Each structure stands twice: as C-alpha cells, then as structure tokens.
Amino acid sequence: MKKNSTLKKSGTDLKRLDAMTDADIDLSDIPEVTPEMFARGVVRRGLKPITKRQLTLRLDSDVVEWFKKQGRGYQTKMNALLRAYMKEHDKVNSSRTRGVARRG
C-alpha cells in the first residue's frame, strides 16, 4: 500500500530568499520600535526587569497639566525624560571622574 504524502511543496521561492541581502528587504510597512515599545517588552531568560516604585512627588501644576494633555502614557513619558536626564548626567559625571583620575 502506498503512503500519501501530507507534505505539500512550499510556494516560497527559497533560492530567491537565500540570495537576498538585508538591503533588499522592504521594511517600509513595519513601524519603527520606539524606546517606549521596547520598554514594555517582556524580559525573559534570566534578565531582571527594572521595577517601578510608587512615590509621592510634588510637581508644578502647569507641568503636570502639560504632560496630561499629551494623552495616555504621560507618566511613562515623564519617566523616560527623567531616565534620559539621569543617563546624560551619568555620562558627564563619569567623564569628569576619568579626567580627574588621569590628572591625579
């Protein structure tokens, strides 16, 4: 008795795909990944996510209202700005520390 093959031949042109370079791939319909999108990703394989901490913070009313007018996710935007500020100051402080170490 002859076995019927359940596998169908793929319609994909594998030779053409193998010959393609990264530059040949059209990514125009794929949205760019923003830092916010990346931050919402699920971390797996042993990496620990950055945990959030709830706190009470006094800010000027006009600042809070401006962020709220930006729409949903305004607290995430505030966090992203504070993180960017923190990272920039870490760079500045570390370059100052290296400069002091060289002189001393």
Image (cartoon, rainbow, N blue to C red):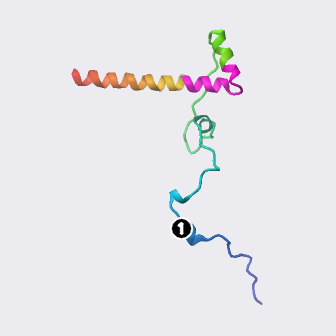
**Magenta span main SS:** helix
Quarter of the C terminus within the rendering: top left
Give how far across and how far down residue 52 sits, in percent: 61, 26
Towards the viewer: 41 or 64 = 64
Residue 71 higher or lower than 4, as above or below: above
Q: Position of 31 compared to 1: left or right?
A: left
Residue at the image point whose x is 59% and y is 41% from the top: 33
Q: Position of 56 compared to 88: left or right?
A: right
Residue 97 higher or lower than 13, as above or below: above
Q: In which quarter of the image is residue 26?
A: bottom right
What residue range appears in magenta?
A: 67-81
Q: Quadrant of residue 91?
A: top left
Q: Quadrant of residue 43?
A: top right
Give how far across and how far down residue 21 sits, in percent: 50, 61
Inspect the image, locate mark 1, and give the three-letter code of the amino acid beneath it: Asp
Q: Which element is circle 1 on?
A: helix
Residue at the image point whose x is 57% and y is 35% from the top: 35
Q: Provide the residue designation for mark 1.
A: 18
